[in-house]
């Protein structure tokens, strides 16, 4: 079993109704994609598809095949738009 801390930012925090939580995922080699699927099942108000969620593990962006370690911190990074318009 792998236990991680999940941080929810911006729209993910609003949709999940929490800013942080501890989650346990069963399995010997749990990857980030499995955690994303579990998060979306437990928080059905998250409107993003689990495979489209961008996440950082211990402050580094990771692909969904990244293997999680017990005690990792996973941050869900919402889509960002906008920018600077010059005239």
Image (tube, rainbow, N blue to C red):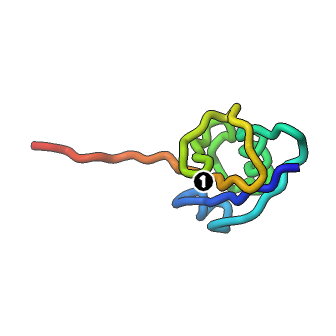
Seen in the picture, residue 64 relative to 23 is either above or below; the reply is: above
Residue 54 lies in quadrant: top right
Is residue 74 or residue 13 the one in the foreground? 74
User: Is the C terminus in the top left, top right, bottom left or bottom right quadrant?
Assistant: top left
| Residue name at image x 58 percent, y 46 percent | 56
Residue 73: x and y in percent read 66, 55
Residue 25: x and y in percent read 84, 49
Disc 1 crowd rating (10 Å Cα; few below 14, some 14-19, many 20+) is many
Q: Which residue is mark 1?
A: 75
Is residue 30 or residue 78 the one in the foreground? 30
Seen in the picture, residue 13 relative to 53 is either above or below; the reply is: below
80 left or right of 51 in image: left
Residue 62: x and y in percent read 59, 38
Residue 11 lies in quadrant: bottom right
52 left or right of 25 in image: left
Residue 66 lies in quadrant: top right
Residue 60: x and y in percent read 54, 45
Q: Secondary structure at mark 1?
A: strand
| Residue name at image x 88 percent, y 40 percent | 28
Q: How many marks?
A: 1
Seen in the picture, residue 53 relative to 20 is either above or below; the reply is: above
53 left or right of 71 in image: left
33 left or right of 57 in image: right
| Residue name at image x 81 percent, y 40 percent | 30
């Amino acid at each position: 079993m792998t236990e991680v801390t999940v941080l929810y930012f911006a729209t993910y925090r609003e949709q999940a109704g929490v800013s942080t939580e501890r989650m346990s995922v069963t399995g010997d080699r749990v990857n980030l994609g499995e955690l994303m699927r579990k998060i979306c099942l437990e928080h059905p108000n998250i409107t993003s598809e689990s495979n489209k969620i961008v996440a950082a593990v211990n402050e580094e962006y990771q692909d969904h095949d990244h293997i999680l370690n017990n005690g990792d911190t996973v941050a869900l990074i919402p889509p960002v738009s906008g920018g600077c318009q010059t005239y």
